Amino acid sequence: MSRRTGRYGAEDYESYERPRRRTRPRTKERPTYDDAVTGRVVTVDRGRYTCLVEDTLVTTMKSRPLGRKGVVVGDSVRIVGDVSGDEGTLARIVEVEQRRTVLRRTADDTDPVERVVVANADQLVVVVALADPEPRLGLVDRALVAAYDAGMDPLLCLTKSDLAAPDDLLAVYAPLGVPYVVTRRGADVTAVRERLDGRTSVLLGHSGVGKSTLVNALVPDADRETGSVNAVTGRGRHTSVSALMLELPAGAGWIVDTPGIRSFGLAHVDPDDLIDAFPDLAALTAGCSRGCTHAASEPECGLDAGVLAGAVAADRVTAYRRLLASREAAA
């Protein structure tokens, strides 16, 4: 019996010392990746990132030094390794460059974890069907809040105008000055394309509103799967399962087709920041007492004083407060 362990003899493997953990000495020097090339992430699928490097699609993975840092569609990244795009090759993303804009959402209104939907986009196109399925203004309001929070320009795209007139819905958002475009299946999409020209635009909306149909019309070789609306629930079926960035013909811009969503959590948005997206209204709140939320329940809000003085239209304040309520309901 071994004196050291009291249990085993020297010939027993249990008595051997375990090998000590050996690590390389730390160094402050980090790889420079001088040979890295710049690419743009166009889609993400199960830990693999398809990046566009010049005119070549390259399959990549995230390098270990990036740790838990997320990589999303729209990111500008630096890549090392085989960027030939040949079948079976795999390069590495070693750096995510600073993002200009970040469109974020949470899974629901109580979820504190932010999820980045798309990076470096200029415009959020909220796609709404005028019928089949019926428009759900709650999502539109929340999408607008997310766009303002991200510093992106909003655009309403109203589809299926052959089934219903757009006038009533447009009247709801007219006080906010949100630009819009109206289209229908089989119609010429020139008006839509003009709104997208030279920009990176994210298409967002419920399933069944016609996003994939619109994408196929804008990019004829996109071949996005289209679906129908469930006759029982009145909701669309998911067709797009992942975000995909596509270049418009003749290099006229980029669009990002996102999967249809059921909800859009705004737990990440600070209600106090929403007013900054409306400079004319923000100017009226300069004299508000500290802690004023600018909601209709506030007794001495500068917005109400502005309406009484004729400095702003009452319907614009009402429309703003509707957006504010859509976020405060999440708190």
Image (tube, grey):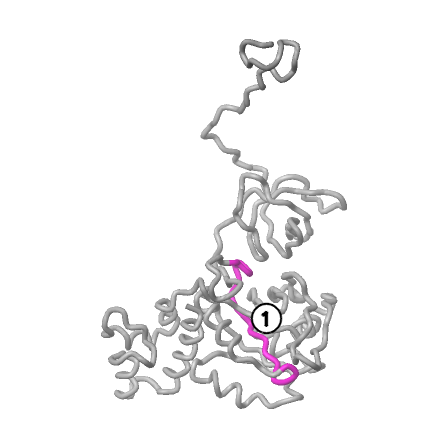
The image shows residue 45 at horizontal and vertical percentages of: 66, 54
The image shows residue 138 at horizontal and vertical percentages of: 51, 77
Residue that extends furthest to the right in the rendered view of this protein: 87
Q: Is residue 129 magenta?
A: yes
Image quarter (top left, top right, bottom left or bottom right) of the N terminus? top right
**Residue 114 drawn above or below residue 263:** above
Q: Quadrant of residue 202?
A: bottom right
Q: Is residue 172 magenta?
A: no
Q: Quadrant of residue 187?
A: bottom right
The image shows residue 75 at horizontal and vertical percentages of: 55, 54
Q: Would you say 173 lies left or right of 82 here?
A: left
Query: Disc 1 residue type?
Result: Arg
What residue is shown at x 69% (from left), y 43% (from top)? 90
Q: Which residue is mark 1?
A: 262
Q: Would you say 118 lies left or right of 81 here?
A: left
Query: Disc 1 on helix, strand or loop?
Result: loop
What residue is shown at x 51% (from left), y 71% (from top)? 143
How many numbered discs sit on the rendered protein? 1
Comparing 83 with 175, the one in front is 175
What residue is shown at x 65% (from left), y 46% (from top)? 60
Magenta residues? Answer: 115-133
Judged by its main secondary structure, the magenta piece is: strand
The image shows residue 161 at horizontal and vertical percentages of: 63, 86
Q: Quadrant of residue 37?
A: top right
Q: Residues within 10 Å of mark 1 (few under 14, many from 20)?
A: few
